[in-house]
Amino acid sequence: MLEWLGQLTDIWGPLRLFSSPLFLSALGVLIGAIATGLALGRGRSRLPTDRGREHAVHAQASKGKPTGAGVLFIPLYAGVCLLVVPISLETVAILLPVLAAMLTGFLDDRAKLPWGEYRKAVLDLGIALGAAGIVFGTGEVEIWVPFWTPKTIDPETGAAILASVTVGPWVSWSVGAAVLWISINATNCTDGVDGLSASLLAVAFVLLGGLLFVAVGNQSVAEFLLLPHSPEAPAWGIMAFTLLGVLGSYLWWNAHPSHLMMGDAGSRPLGLLLGLFVLATGNVFLLPVVAGMVLVNGGTGLVKVALLRFFRIGIFREVRFPLHDHVRQNLGWSAPQVLVRFVVLQAIIAPLLIVLILKVR
């Protein structure tokens, strides 16, 4: 919405800043941080209280604390996006499944009895399918593939043709929905230690925002790296960076010892946004790269439960999942140690993997 001010340079020259995606990103971070900080400070007393998670380590420490804070900061995030992101039908449409994930999560947070796993899984799948359809549309989709060097040469320019694969809508929808569903549930499972999920997501959003701005959204860089260029990528980058301001203010209240928690109302839409930014890069394989610790911590538990429940295959019986429960109970790590060590691992490993994926092709 603010982008139109960049067209009024005849009135005042500095207004051209509003046509810069980087300036709009910085503005989004600032507005998101201030709005979220005020909302959480004034509204946390009206949130439902945590019931404590069954079988979770130190569950009693969080019992009774305000939870479901996502119902406060996710709508604010959507509003800030409408303010700083160049408005398009896709921008408005993609916020709808994000708000739907927030709403279903909040209804679970405030329910007297927690919703069943299958009920939540079906709702997440429906949201994931709708979101994947909005991102990919009904046409063919070009996905760039890591560790693959193109062997075809353009006869006119002599340049290598993009290292990508074109897939039909059914494939893109299926794969995209799977990525989003996994991202939603892995993020939800990771939300169990003060500041952990928000901090890991912040690292992922910085990396994804940088990729969307510098690589996928920049035509010259995309051509050099043999990536499909996306004109919409800078808008996605603004959305990713804007979320950093929101998460920063949330972490102010959620730092150990926390005063409130995001609940499913926060973790589910944040997990959905993580997956959406991955899809926006054009490479579905980036999810374990930018959010490896989220998948290792929360996603591996989903695999263990699925194998045991549906195939009667028991693996990692000696390991508790989410992994943050295992290291606290079996290795004696404190909550701050879990936070710092998991974030350090992701902050070191993820950039290295991104460089390898981009250059070793």
Image: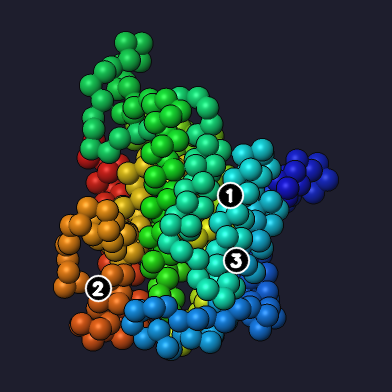
Q: Mark 1: which amino acid?
A: Pro
Residue 289 as seen in the image, left or right of residue 29 = left
Nearer to us in this view, 239 or 180: 180
State the residue in front, 335 or 248.
335
309 over 133 or under it: above or below: below
Q: Which comes sooner in the sequence, label 2 or label 1? A: 1
Q: Are marks 2 and 3 in contact (CB under 8 Å)?
A: no
Q: Which residue is mark 2?
A: 320
Q: Which disc is residue 338 wearing?
A: none
Q: Nearer the viewer, mark 2 or mark 3?
A: 3
Residue at point 57%, 60% (across, down): 104
Q: Residue at x 39, y 66 (%)?
A: 189
Check disc 3 and report the residue beneath it: 107
The alpha-carbon separation of the residues under discs 3 and 1 comes to 15 Å
Q: Residue 28 sits in which quadrant?
A: bottom right
Q: Secondary structure at mark 2?
A: loop
Q: Position of residue 46 (x, y in %)?
A: 68, 80
Residue 337 position (above or below residue 143):
below
Q: Secondary structure at mark 3?
A: helix
- Residue 138 lies left or right of residue 43; in this view the side is left
Q: Name the residue beneath numbered marker 1.
A: 97
Tell me what residue is drawn at x 46 percent, y 64 percent.
116
Can you tell which quarter of the image residue 222 is in? top left
Identify the residue shown where x is 53% and y is 87%: 64
